[in-house]
Amino acid sequence: SNKWKVNPTVIDLGNGVIIGGDEFAIMSGPCSIEGEEQIADTIDFLKSQGVKIMRGGVYKPRSSPYSFRGLGIDGLKLWYKMAREAGLKIITEVMQVSQIEEMHDYVDIYQVGARNTQNFNLLDELGKVDKAVMIKRGISGTIDELLYSAEYVFSGGNEKLLLCERGIRTYEKASRNTFDINAIPILKEKTHLPVIADPSHGIGIRKHVGEVAMASVIAGADGVIFESHSCPEKAYSDGQQTLDFKESEKLIKAMKETHKLR
Ligand code: PEP
Ligand code: MN
């Protein structure tokens, strides 16, 4: 699709929330949506930072079926109501075709998770929706495979697409995944789509998330999505890679300042 699109894709989510072009998008929130109090805490925090897009999972792809698997559609509806009152946009993972329609009125960006990057039926169906879609790079996916996945959605007619580097599985065990910083300039060169970095899943180690996030800003990312929680130690999932609000505040400030210098 880069052959016929010369201008970078800019996605307008409404109410002045724009991704791509000269904008730098910050998306943050918990790995999993856990309940009303947690949603309220996160919204208050994001609002205080001027962050306009909240992340969170209500359908969670967990390695073990016995782990917390999310609050489902009722959690999404509650979250949506609270987020809208606060003027925040929502990005959340859709795991299967049947969820697309039930989630439709309550999401601003559908996230395709790393385990579903090559779920071609899901991608085909997302090609037909009128909402933005962010596709994460597959667990062991190449850059080209990510691009082909994007083509599925794009060729279906949905051009509101974002690409996300979230690390890949390599032989390295010192970090959860190997964040591929190379992917950022390469994706920027090969496509016209906004490129988002996910340092949380990329490294999986809380004290280093900020460093990977900053590297991504310098590498040219159009945005960063990272996990935050008022008390990461108590998070239902991914607490080990989740920043508390103090750490998040520091990172948000640093990313904004660095983006201005690009
Ligand atoms: C997530 O964003 O919480 C998530 C499950 O991400 P990934 O698909 O990259 O593992
Ligand atoms: Mn997570």
Image: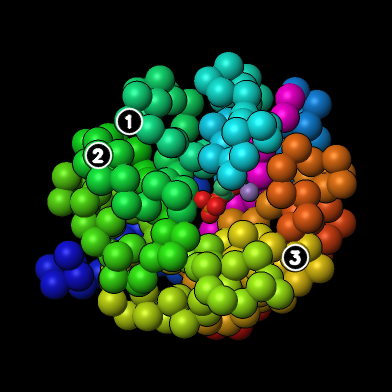
User: Does the stretch in magenta take in 26?
Assistant: yes
- Alpha carbon separation for disc pair 3 and 1: 32 Å
Give 140 or 30, whichever is nearer the viewer.
140
Q: Are marks 3 and 1 in contact (CB under 8 Å)?
A: no
Q: Are marks 1 and 2 in contact (CB under 8 Å)?
A: yes
Residue that numbered label 2 is attached to: 121
Write the residue at 28% across / 76% down: 190
- Alpha carbon separation for disc pair 2 and 3: 33 Å
Residue that numbered label 1 is attached to: 97
Write the residue at 33% across / 63% down: 146
| Label 1 Cα crowd, 10 Å radius (few <14 / some 14-19 / many 20+) | some
Write the residue at 38% across / 33% down: 96
Three-letter amino acid code of the residue under disc 1:
Val
> What colour scheme governs how the chains and residues are painted in the rendered image of this protein?
rainbow
Three-letter amino acid code of the residue under disc 3:
Ile
Residue 131 spot, x, y in % from top left:
35, 38
